[in-house]
Image (cartoon, rainbow, N blue to C red):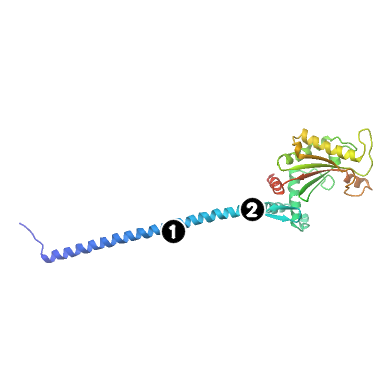
C-alpha cells in the first residue's frame, strides 16, 4: 500500500519550511550583527581601560612630582611638599605655646626639626635652656651644648659625662652621608693662661679639637666630614657680668650642614 500527501498539504508544508529557513537566516544575520557590535564594544572597553590605566599612571607620576617640588623658606632653605607634610605631622606633637609663636614657614621648620632632633638625641635628662639648644639658621642646624656637659672647668679634656650626648650626635652624623659638621669652641671673657693653655683662643680651639678627635676616634665619624674651629670669647650669647651669664657663654656649638629634606626625612624616621 502506498500513501500520498495531498497537494494542498504539501504546499502548506513547503511554505512552513520556507518560513523556518527564513527565520534561521534572519537569526544567523542577527547573531553575526550582534557579534560585530560586541567586538566594537569590547574594543571600546579595552580602549577605555587603557586610558584609565594611563591616567592612573599619570596621576601617580604627578603625585610623585608634586612631592618633590620645592618651596622656598624665606632666604633660608627649600623644602619639598613631602617634607612639608612630615613637618605638619610633627608639629601636632609640639608644645602648643611654642607652636603659637611660629609666624612663618621658617619658624615652623625650626620647631619641627628641633623637635625631631631633640627626640633623636634624647635631651630628656638635660636642662633645655642651660644645657642644650637647637635651632636652624641659614640652612644649617646648630646644636649649642653647655661646656659643663662636656668639660671640666678650665680644661679641654672631655669628661666622661659627655659620652652619652656625643654618641647620639655621632649616630646622627654617621647616618646621613650628606652631613658635614663644624665644631666651634666658645669661652667666656675671663682671661685664662697656664702651662697648658695660652689664652682663650687656645682654649676654644683645643676644646673644639678634643670633640672632633673623640667623634673620629671613639665614634667612627669620618674625619673628612669634620671641621674644628675656635671663636674665643668674641661671640657671646650674653654679657659676662655674672656667673650665670659667663656660664651661658662657655659652650660648644655643633653646626650641622645637611640637605634639609634628607635631614628632616632622617629625623622623621627615628622612632
Task: Mark 1: give few (<14), some (14-19) or many (20+) Cα within 10 Å.
Answer: few
Query: How many numbered marks are there?
Result: 2
The foreground one among 181 and 242 is 181
Mark sitting on residue 189: none
**Left or right of 109, for residue 153:** right
Q: Residue furthest front?
A: 224
Element under disc 1: helix
What residue is disc 1 on?
A: 44
Residue 171: where, in percent of width, then height?
73, 39
**Left or right of 171, for residue 57:** left
* Quadrant in which the C terminus appears: top right
What residue is disc 2 on?
A: 67
Element under disc 2: helix
Residue 119: where, in percent of width, then height?
74, 45
* Quadrant in which the N terminus appears: bottom left
For marks 2 and 1, the one nearer the N-term is 1
Q: Residue at x 80, y 40 (%)?
A: 227
Dividing the picture into quadrants, the one containing residue 158 is top right
Residue 205: where, in percent of width, then height?
86, 39
Dividing the picture into quadrants, the one containing residue 13 is bottom left
Amino acid at each position: 500500500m502506498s500513501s500520498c500527501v495531498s497537494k494542498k498539504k504539501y504546499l502548506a508544508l513547503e511554505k512552513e519550511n520556507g518560513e523556518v529557513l527564513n527565520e534561521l537566516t534572519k537569526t544567523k544575520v542577527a547573531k553575526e550583527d550582534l557579534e560585530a557590535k560586541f567586538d566594537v564594544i569590547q574594543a571600546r572597553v579595552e580602549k577605555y581601560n587603557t586610558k584609565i590605566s594611563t591616567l592612573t599612571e599619570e596621576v601617580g607620576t604627578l603625585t610623585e612630582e608634586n612631592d618633590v617640588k620645592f618651596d622656598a623658606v624665606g632666604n633660608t632653605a627649600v623644602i619639598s611638599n613631602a617634607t612639608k607634610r612630615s613637618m605638619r605631622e610633627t608639629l601636632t606633637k609640639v608644645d602648643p605655646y611654642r607652636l603659637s609663636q611660629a609666624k612663618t614657614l621658617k619658624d615652623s621648620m625650626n620647631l619641627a626639626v628641633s623637635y625631631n632632633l631633640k627626640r633623636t638625641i634624647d635631651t630628656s635628662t638635660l636642662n633645655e635652656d642651660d644645657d642644650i639648644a637647637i635651632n636652624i639658621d641659614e640652612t644649617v642646624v646648630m646644636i649649642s651644648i653647655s661646656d659643663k656637659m662636656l668639660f671640666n672647668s678650665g680644661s679641654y679634656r672631655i669628661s666622661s659625662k659627655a659620652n652619652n650626648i656625643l654618641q647620639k650626635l655621632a649616630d646622627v652624623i654617621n647616618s646621613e652621608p650628606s652631613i658635614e659638621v663644624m665644631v666651634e669652641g666658645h669661652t667666656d671673657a675671663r682671661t685664662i693662661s697656664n702651662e697648658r693653655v695660652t689664652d682663650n683662643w687656645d682654649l676654644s680651639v683645643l676644646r673644639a679639637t678634643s670633640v672632633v678627635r673623640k667623634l673620629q676616634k671613639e665614634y667612627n665619624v669620618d674625619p673628612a666630614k669634620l671641621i674644628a674651629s675656635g671663636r674665643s670669647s668674641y661671640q657671646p650669647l650674653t654679657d659676662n657680668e655674672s656667673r650665670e651669664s659667663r656660664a651661658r657663654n662657655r659652650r660648644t656649638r655643633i653646626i650641622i650642614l645637611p640637605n634639609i629634606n634628607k635631614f628632616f626625612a632622617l629625623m622623621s624616621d627615628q622612632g
